[in-house]
Image (tube, rainbow, N blue to C red):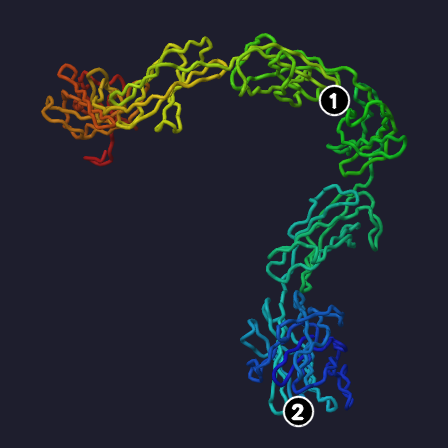
Amino acid sequence: MFSIFGESAFFAFAENDGIVPPDDPPGLSHIDTTAGNGVNESNIPAENGIKVDISGESDTGSVTGQDGIPADDGGNDAGQDGTIINDGSEGPESTGLVNIQNTEVLEFTESFSFIGWDLTNENFINADDAVMFRVKATFASQNRITDILFNYSTNGENWQSLEPLIKTGYDFPIFWDENTNEGYREIWLDLSSLPDGDIWIQAVAYDELNNNHSQSIKLFKDTAIPYIYSFTPNDNSILSGKQVSITVEARDGNNSRIKLIEIQVSPDDEKNWYTIGSMSEDVLTHSSYYSRGTYLWDSTAIIDGYGKLEDGSYKFRAIAHDRAGNISNGTPVRIWNLDNTAPAPPSGLKATSSLEKITITWDANTESDLASNNRYSIYRSTTQGEGYEFITYRNTTSYEDITPSVAPEVTYYYVVTARDKAGNESGYSNEVSASALRDVTPPVITYTSVDTNPYVGGPSVPLTFRATEDSPRGVEIFIFEYSSDGGESWTLITSGKPSRNASGNFYYLDRNWNTAGLVSGEYILRFTARNYEGLSVFEDRIINLDLYASAPDNVEADPREGAVFLTWDAVPDDDFKRYEVYRAESIDGNYTKLTDITNKNITEYEDKTGTIGKTYYYKIRFVDTFNNYSDSLIVWAQPLDDMTPPNVTKIRIDNPGSGTSTGGPEIRFYAEATDNKEIVSMDAEYSVDNGVSWTSQGITKGKLNKSTSYYYIYFEWNTGGLSPGTYSVLVKVKAADVVGNEGYLSLTDETAWTVDLEVSAVTGLTCTTRDGEITLEWEPVTDSDLPSSYVYSVYRSNTPGGPY
């Protein structure tokens, strides 16, 4: 039921009492036409306005004037808030539409009443095309209702007449009840020609003075059939038990959304289907294009209309219903194997008592469908024959129950069950009992890291020890302590649970002793091992702790060209490990390590990495074999300007040729240079006129590389810019350092390269033709520098003069 109201009229959809379905004879036989006894199904008095009731198996309605344009009397359609309310009561059976039901009367003003409807998610129609509307209208002025017209729109604005869509024989004339001043019209519409999507239906009532008012409702037409997108478990899955998860995803595009998913089984190869469960709209998960849910099925339950399913293969399907009443086609169909028969109980169960442990064993089950994992379940009780509690799964036929899971000297009772792949669990095996023995022996310490070398030291001293234990629980804790007063008092170093070695024959723990705050001297280390019964053992070891390292003396910083040169005295310590050189840009700044020196007698270092004119601060650290260290006093200096140019030390032919002989279109050569600081570039030139003029034409250089003590580079010389001939070539390489100093190396007359850029032409070329072949002959070239193989290249053309 819905209504609208304006300044002088209101409309309402009435409930569906007495509606004639489409296959009934045409007419208004369902309306009492007795004078003075007209039907007013909403029982709302007409007050200063028009009342229009529209009801039917549709939940839409809207109005236009006689010209097809919506009437506008200043009123508000569908109530002041536009709400449409549905109380959920049942009307006559619907064919393709959601039924519209009567609800409460709401008072809005002194002279208007509103009967509202909530059609949210319910205003849907499907592919069925029979849609009935019944309209009742009343004028408070008692003017006679002369007409009620219907229109539709797909956007709520541009209205078209519905009159052409009235089903033949189902357009009933206006009926006027003189007693109640109410007018009626009933029509059946064929909406099959309208597109899917939003459809607004409008009703317009006119009185004898041509006063009119309109009301509209909104439908959603959905003829798209939903479908099952996914349905699991997959084919040939084995199902069993009371909690079988069945997951279904149905899709309905962007249409009316899924309202219900039914899950069905066929025990007779799809002749009959029985519903085993369903998921309603409120339990499904919805997105814009799908609805998904998981149903937990009790596969042992009685199925309505059939009974209980025995073990075997059955066909299953899911059926999706959308909110417009469209139903999926019943595909896909899954074949699932039902197995609710459990294995036999395990037999031959035995129990054995040992130290802090009870071991149970049993005979393996012989069923072919036993579970691959979690095959056997172990249950335990402290009461014979009852009170069993699950403790663990096993895939083998034995289990060790170890303290603290079991208390020593307490009797425990055990049973075992078997499980198949479907999850069916057998009954209990025979019962066995046993008690774990109590541990009365402490651990045995077998090794400490200071057994053979009592001299340790450094800021962090590594400690370790080992112990054996006969209890299956092993050692609970290892404790490290020290005493500096001959054993009168003890200080905890650390403690922890030990690990078991790979072969399982001892326990061990590695820890570090932080010696901060201690001094060098003699100490006693105590190693303690304690088991879970509280039984403990300890071993004491006397050690000499070395926490001292000498500081390097007489450190000096000598400023040099592009560098700072550091010197110091060797330390007197016998346990030398290394010197470390540190540098900072302020005296209390962050010091960065420049290098390590591992020879005690090397007591100098040259820093070439600084910026000229900038002051740097240095310190030398001595580190001993225990990683004790001590820093020298801080010194500082500035690198002086770099006045030394680089030194180019080598120019060498790489390929082709060697020594001073080369040639060809591409010549590769190599150069080396050194510098007191850093070389940033190297370039090359050549001269073919004994040094009168120089050029770099055709020369490209590769990447500049740095070796340990020198820089090197490769050059590629394309000789295409020179005429053919043999040249005496001088080559010059220049190197530049970071401050712009340049150094050169040039070949001399004695080291000049002989560059051969020509080869004699082939002469005397003749050809002889034979059957299927051409033989070429020519005079041999007599140049002395021909290669040993592939001397000649043969070219061919199809036309005189080339191209070859």
Q: Quadrant of residue 20?
A: bottom right
* Residue shown at the point (89%, 34%) measured from the top left: 386
- 53, 570: nearer the viewer: 570
Q: How crowded is mark 1: few (under 14 residues within 10 Å), some or many (20 or more)?
A: some
Judged left or right of residue 305, residue 4 is left
Q: In which quarter of the image is residue 707?
A: top left
Q: Which disc is residue 532 wearing?
A: 1
Above or below 600: residue 215:
below
Q: Which disc is residue 143 wearing?
A: 2
Judged left or right of residue 560, residue 753 is left
Q: Which disc is residue 355 wearing?
A: none
Q: How crowded is mark 2: few (under 14 residues within 10 Å), some or many (20 or more)?
A: some
Q: Position of residue 706 (x, y in %)?
A: 31, 23
- 755, 458: nearer the viewer: 458
Instruction: Calculate the distance from the C-alpha at mark 2 to the C-alpha at mark 1.
Output: 102 Å
Report the quarter where the N terminus lies. Answer: bottom right
Helix, strand, or loop for circle 2? loop
Residue 101 visible somewhere in the drawing: yes
Label 1 amino acid?
Tyr
Residue 54 visible somewhere in the drawing: no
Report the quarter where the C terminus lies. Answer: top left
Total numbered badges shown on the rendered structure: 2
